[in-house]
Image (cartoon, coloured by chain):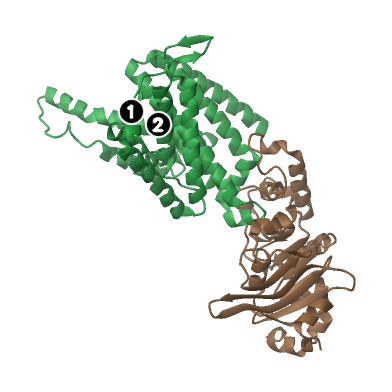
């Protein structure tokens, strides 16, 4: 039974990965970049799933980890010649992990809403620091830099194209998924789930719950930082907007849309949300142009605030698919 | 007769000659505002003993357990376990010293399987920080968990969600979780609460079986359970020890009859 399920899982994994590898061939430049961004936001959402879905803690501090990954990468890319991809990853991960350790140490003493608020406050503190420390961070304007090459010194050096960058990001996100999946099934991951289910009982059977939470936040922050590094490389800038807590909120929304506690769900959620937003933002101008072709003048239709239907769809998903898109699909497949 | 002795003398009498008590409290007290929930409790239990703690509602039985297991920090006095002071340690540290407990209100992981409930408890002693190995790869933990399930009679329900077990089965799973941490002292808080007569008999037999290797403290309202199981009984009343002795002594103690057994 379980062996069969494992086989089905790996077959599905291989098919989906193969599809993702060939997908950009049929797509124009814009959509290739869009797909890359979906994967990056998916990685951010997946990193926060470790806390939301597995440990039962909602973090609004992920923008800080994501942002520090970005600025860490920026530091490496601006200070080293030629800019090195691996140093960008290293600096970004160190910056994110340091901040995650700091935030984790203080916030995990608190539970539920108090944990969420504390992480939110921390991310805002880092936002203010980055926003005002103009000499180092570029302040409001952020930092711009050039993209490093995909290189192993002494062996080869390939400049990134949209396509190779997509594959690189796909490889990193797939690797992260496999690592996180393994962590969630390790004895450590089972303790996190036990904390989610019954924190007091988990403590009573001998687990130092706070220490487990600290390590969980650090892992989560590390992968959020990795997403930040990828975003910096993709867009060649770091900006304070990405440290603002709203980014953390988006990660939570992707989780809820896709299904918490599944790792893949948050990526599905990010894809659904970003595609819907993009589609809806084009829908109303398109409808207006079709209408005008038929001699109908509908004033204001082109400028219709498309976030309203997006919000309605989100609310509908929360009400009718409380386990998210992936949870809903899984149930349907099992029936 | 026993009621005339001071509680300190009672504590000394509780330990058989030559056997150091596994657990001892010295002048244990806890206050909630103006209320002294426990007051000057001198208690000792010998290794291998089954000790019942009884008393009217609000006598301080659960508070006493909560102090022993670190959920509450005593306001005064000391708790010694194997002559090692554990007063005010966190619940996880006390669990690691070898004290486990079950709860009055069923306290399990409802969305995990029966096996996972005890497996996670067994894992608390070994491999808890392993990050990159699948949890099922640790056969020693799974074997331990399966052995515990067999002991508490739930081997056939291993793959069932804990939430789907009957009330009686959940009560026994509760004991299984505590047992899986390999305790020396097991505190059972009303293990037969809400059970049918048949289930109660099974649980009494279970407690007898596991008592061969452990010291057991049991809080219970069902007097047939208490009288049938306990070697000795401690009666708490208003947070203090009212009497202590064998079941026969307690049953004939006029003060115990007055405040508790007759009501």
Quarter of the C terminus of chain B within the rendering: bottom right
Identify the mark nearer the N-term, 1 or 2: 2
Using the image, name the chain to which the residue with label 2 belongs.
Answer: A
Identify whether A311 is placed above or below A118: above
Residue B195 screen position, x and y as percent: 69, 66
Residue positioned 66% across, 50% down in the render: B117
Q: Are marks 1 and 2 in contact (CB under 8 Å)?
A: yes
Task: Report the residue marked by disc 1.
Answer: A143
Using the image, name the chain to which the residue with label 1 belongs.
Answer: A
Residue A99 screen position, x and y as percent: 47, 40
Quarter of the N terminus of chain B within the rendering: bottom right
Q: Which chain is green?
A: A
Please tell me which residue lies in front, B44 or A197.
B44
At numbered mark 1, what does the secondary structure look like: helix, strand or loop?
strand
Residue A33 screen position, x and y as percent: 36, 21
Q: Which mark is residue B61?
A: none
Asked where in the image residue B60 lies, by quadrant, the reply is bottom right
- Look at chain B in the picture and name its colour: brown
Please tell me which residue lies in front, A224 or B223.
A224
Q: Is residue B43 left or right of residue A262?
A: right
Residue positioned 40% across, 35% down in the render: A67
Identify whether A18 is placed above or below B186: above
Task: Report the residue marked by disc 2.
Answer: A71
Residue A260 in sight: no
Residue B128 in sight: yes
């Amino acid at each position: 039974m379980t062996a069969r399920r494992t086989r089905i899982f790996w077959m599905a994994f291989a098919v989906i990965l193969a599809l993702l590898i060939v997908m950009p061939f049929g797509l124009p430049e814009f959509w290739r970049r869009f797909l890359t961004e979906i994967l990056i936001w998916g990685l951010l959402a997946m990193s926060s799933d470790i806390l939301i879905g597995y440990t039962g803690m909602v973090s609004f501090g992920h923008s800080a980890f994501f942002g520090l990954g970005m600025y860490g990468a920026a530091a490496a890319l601006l200070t080293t010649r030629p800019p090195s991809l691996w140093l960008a990853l290293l600096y970004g991960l160190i910056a994110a992990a340091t901040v995650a350790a700091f935030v984790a140490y203080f916030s995990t003493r608190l539970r539920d809403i108090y944990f969420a608020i504390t992480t939110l406050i921390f991310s805002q503190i880092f936002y203010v620091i980055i926003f005002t420390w103009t000499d180092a961070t570029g302040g409001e304007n952020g930092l711009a830099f050039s993209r490093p090459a995909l290189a192993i010194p002494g062996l080869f050096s390939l400049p990134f194209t949209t396509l190779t960058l997509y594959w690189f990001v796909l490889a990193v996100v797939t690797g992260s998924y496999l690592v996180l999946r393994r962590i969630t099934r390790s004895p450590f991951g089972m303790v996190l789930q036990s904390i989610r289910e019954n924190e007091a009982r988990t403590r009573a059977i001998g687990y130092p719950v706070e220490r487990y939470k600290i390590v969980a936040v650090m892992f989560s922050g590390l992968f959020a930082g990795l997403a930040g590094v990828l975003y910096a490389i993709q867009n060649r800038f770091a900006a304070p907007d990405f440290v603002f807590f709203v980014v953390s909120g988006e990660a939570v929304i992707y989780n809820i849309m896709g299904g918490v506690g599944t790792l893949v769900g948050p990526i599905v959620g990010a894809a659904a949300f970003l595609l819907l937003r993009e589609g809806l933002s084009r829908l109303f101008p398109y409808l207006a142009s079709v209408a005008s072709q038929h001699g109908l003048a509908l004033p204001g239709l082109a400028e219709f605030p498309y976030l309203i239907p997006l919000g309605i769809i989100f609310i509908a998903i929360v009400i009718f698919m409380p386990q998210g898109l992936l949870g809903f699909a899984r149930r349907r497949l099992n029936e | 007769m026993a009621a005339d002795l001071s509680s300190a003398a009672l504590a000394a009498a509780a330990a058989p000659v030559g056997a150091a008590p596994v657990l001892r409290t010295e002048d244990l007290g806890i206050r909630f505002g103006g209320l002294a929930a426990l007051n000057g409790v001198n208690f000792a239990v010998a290794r291998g003993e089954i000790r019942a703690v009884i008393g009217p509602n609000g006598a301080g039985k659960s508070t006493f357990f909560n102090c022993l297991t670190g959920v509450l920090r005593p306001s005064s006095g000391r708790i010694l376990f194997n002559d090692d002071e554990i007063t005010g340690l966190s619940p996880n540290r006390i669990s690691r010293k070898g004290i486990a407990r079950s709860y009055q209100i069923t306290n399990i992981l409802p969305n995990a399987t029966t096996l996972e409930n005890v497996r996670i408890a067994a894992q608390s002693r070994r491999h808890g920080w392993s990050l990159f190995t699948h949890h099922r790869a640790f056969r020693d933990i799974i074997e331990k968990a399966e052995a515990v399930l067999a002991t508490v009679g739930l081997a056939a329900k291993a793959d069932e969600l804990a939430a789907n077990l009957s009330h009686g089965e959940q009560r026994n799973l509760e004991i299984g979780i505590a047992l899986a941490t390999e305790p020396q002292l097991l505190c059972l808080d009303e293990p037969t609460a809400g059970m049918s007569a048949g289930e109660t008999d099974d649980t009494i037999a279970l407690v007898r079986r596991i008592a061969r290797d452990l010291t057991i403290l049991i809080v219970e309202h069902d007097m047939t359970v208490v009288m049938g199981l306990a070697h000795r009984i401690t009666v708490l009343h208003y947070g203090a020890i009212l009497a202590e002795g064998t079941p026969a002594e307690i049953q004939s103690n006029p003060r115990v009859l007055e405040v508790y057994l007759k009501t």
